[in-house]
Amino acid sequence: MNILIFSLILLAGAYVAGLLGSLTGLGGGVVVIPLLTLVFHVDIRYAIGAALLASIANSSGAASAYIKEGITNVRLGMFLEIATTVGAVGGALIAVFTPTNTIAILFGVVLIFSALMTVRKKHEHALQEGSRLSYILKLNSNYPTPQGEVSYKLQNIGGGFSIMLLAGVLSGLLGIGSGALKVLAMDGAMKIPFKVSTTTSNFMIGVTAAASAVVYLQRGYIDPGIAFPVVLGVLGGAFTGARLLTVMNPKTLRYIFCAAISFVALEMIYNGLHHQF
Amino acid sequence: MKLIKTLTGDRDIALLVGQVLRTGVITASAIAFVGGVLYLAKHGADSIPDYSTFTGEGKEYTTFSGIFRGLTTFKPSAVIQFGALILLATPILRICFSLIGFAVEKDRMYVVITLIVLGIILFSMFGGLKV
């Protein structure tokens, strides 16, 4: 296979990754890593470098649209980014000492968890009574809904902050945005309405990924020949996905995609256990 | 200061941040696209490098000076890496703009919080963490 064909296949694969990622909310990175490692047998370290770039492109592209709609809680995002960036730098550091097979197994586990999180039931109520810390940090806010502005309050800031730290570590270690964990921290622990959680998570992913991507770039994980088709493909796919979202309801697609992702995850775990990486 | 404030209300800062993110992504992908086309024109017919064993990129693609040196000679891979650098810079630039936004609002607590996040990222850039 020559480079031209390799690049074109990768471009098409990354396009599908970006499309499915934006339609299901799982981000492009979760498809890019299995695609590169399982299909093209690329070393997982190159895959992580490419996935981080894909995560940043995806997040920055989507976040710009959400900010415009005024749903993203910018203060909350900035506050929690302390946790995710510390975690991400830490994750990138321990990655050197983590065998690639362990990374693959861990990736599989996180993938299955993310798939489960995506199809679970979400609560969409706004909390009326916030914790003391939420007032001190000015995190309570409001967001627009079809029924008008809804104000919400936060609780369990410490719990959410700790989960964010873990999300950061996994993001730095695996090269993914770990949006599922970020949403768990906000929607599960801090009881923020789901729509605010997802958009704020998306907003944060770029910064989290950039914190570890700089380390990976210096370590030589980002290969130009893999990077350009992945970035262009994921971005194009995410762009198309965002347009499709307004005309279709991706509910069924989400279930199919999550089943497929779980299958891929099992394959990653299986290969990891048999030292195929 | 008053002028800045009228120009940049809370909402406008958010819009500006959104604009920064969009511009950054579009610029980065445009550069990566140009680099990619140059790369394919030059190496398209070559067989793919062995990506199954990790060797890591050399200094010319992992350091600022290396990438910029390659850029002056239009080296395709250096152009792509430059696009990657712009992509990496986008979220960092976003933090800088948020910092300005919080400073204009005189929100001291969030100026400090933003500085902490920026500090962590700069530490990862220049802290010699490449191991």
Image (spheres, rainbow, N blue to C red):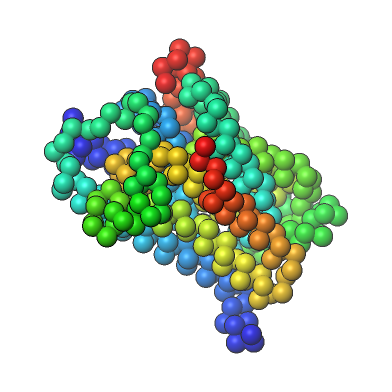
Q: Quadrant of the C terminus of chain A?
A: top left
Please say whether residue A225 is visible from this viewpoint: yes
Residue A23 sits in quarter = top left
Q: Looking at the image, is B15 positioned above or below residue A45?
A: below
Depth check, front residue: B74 or A84: B74
Quick one: which residue is furthest to the top in this view? A274
Q: Looking at the image, is B6 positioned above or below residue B68?
A: below
Q: Quadrant of the N terminus of chain A?
A: top left
Image point (37%, 60%), residue name: B26
Depth check, front residue: A223 or A156: A223
Image point (69%, 66%), residue name: B111
Quick one: which residue is furthest to the right in this view? A132
Quick one: which residue is furthest to the bottom in this view? B3
Counting labels gives 0
Q: Position of residue B33 (x, y in %)?
A: 27, 54
Depth check, front residue: A125 or A129: A129
Q: Looking at the image, is A27 positioned above or below residue B92?
A: above
Image point (64%, 87%), residue name: B2
Relative side of A14 to A90, left or right: left
Q: Position of residue A28 (x, y in %)?
A: 43, 42
Depth check, front residue: B56 or A31: B56
Q: Position of residue A103 (x, y in %)?
A: 51, 26
Q: Position of residue A219 (x, y in %)?
A: 45, 40
Please say whether residue A180 is visible from this viewpoint: no
Image point (78%, 45%), residue name: A158
Relative side of B119 to A232, left or right: right
Residue A150 sits in quarter = bottom right
